[in-house]
Image: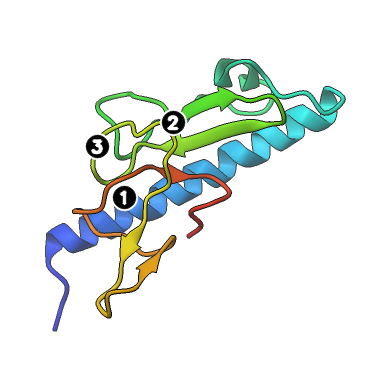
């Protein structure tokens, strides 16, 4: 059985989100290495040295960037996820067909954010 176009679109959006979180995480790591372990206050500080532009959140509204917050120890970076709502970095929990949960498999009905370093593709 072939997946429906909406399922393919969702999978593409999910994969693009993982890619953008990874690229941004790597840019943050490079920034940190160049700044004695410190992370930037905003993602804008990564351009143009570490990134040409701030990645747009594929699950967000038009031109909304990934969400970034500097924390005491490091940072919190996430996409608003399939529910289209900013849940403050609360990780998305995917529900598998056998009733178990996963931090890696999502459906368009799941809630929560896709968090870099927690939800991995």
- The tally of labels here is 3
Residue 97 is situated, as x and y percent measured from the top left of the image, at 25, 77
In this rendering, which labeled residue sits more in front, label 2 or label 3? 3
Residue 92 is situated, as x and y percent measured from the top left of the image, at 37, 50
Looking at the image, the residue that sits furthest to the front is 99
Classed neighbour count for the residue bearing mark 3: other residues with Cα under 10 Å, few (<14), some (14–19), many (≥20): some
- Circle 1 is placed at which residue position? 13
The residue at the point 51 percent across, 57 percent down is 120
Give the camera-side residue of 31 and 91: 91
Q: In the drawing, what numbered circle is on residue 21?
A: none
Q: Quadrant of the N terminus?
A: bottom left
**Is 89 drawn above or below residue 93 in the view shown?**
above
Q: Which is more N-terminal, label 2 or label 1?
A: 1
The residue at the point 48 percent across, 54 percent down is 119
Mark 1 and mark 3: Cα distance apart in space: 12 Å
- Circle 2 is placed at which residue position? 66
Mark 2 and mark 3: Cα distance apart in space: 12 Å
Residue 66 is situated, as x and y percent measured from the top left of the image, at 44, 31
- Circle 3 is placed at which residue position? 84
| Label 2: element kind | loop
Give the camera-side residue of 85 and 25: 85
Q: Is residue 14 left or right of residue 49?
A: left
Q: Which is more N-terminal, label 3 or label 2?
A: 2
| Label 1: element kind | helix
């Amino acid at each position: 059985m072939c997946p429906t176009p909406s399922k393919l679109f969702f999978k593409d959006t999910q994969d693009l989100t993982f890619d953008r979180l990874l690229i941004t995480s790597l840019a943050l790591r490079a920034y940190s290495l160049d700044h004695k372990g410190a992370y930037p206050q905003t993602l804008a500080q990564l351009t143009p040295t570490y990134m040409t532009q701030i990645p747009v959140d594929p699950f967000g509204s038009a031109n909304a960037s990934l969400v970034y917050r500097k924390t005491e120890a490091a940072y919190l970076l996430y996409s608003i996820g399939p529910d289209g709502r900013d849940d403050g970095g609360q990780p998305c929990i995917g529900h598998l067909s056998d009733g178990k949960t996963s931090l890696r498999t999502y459906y368009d009905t799941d809630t929560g954010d896709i968090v870099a370093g927690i939800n991995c593709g």
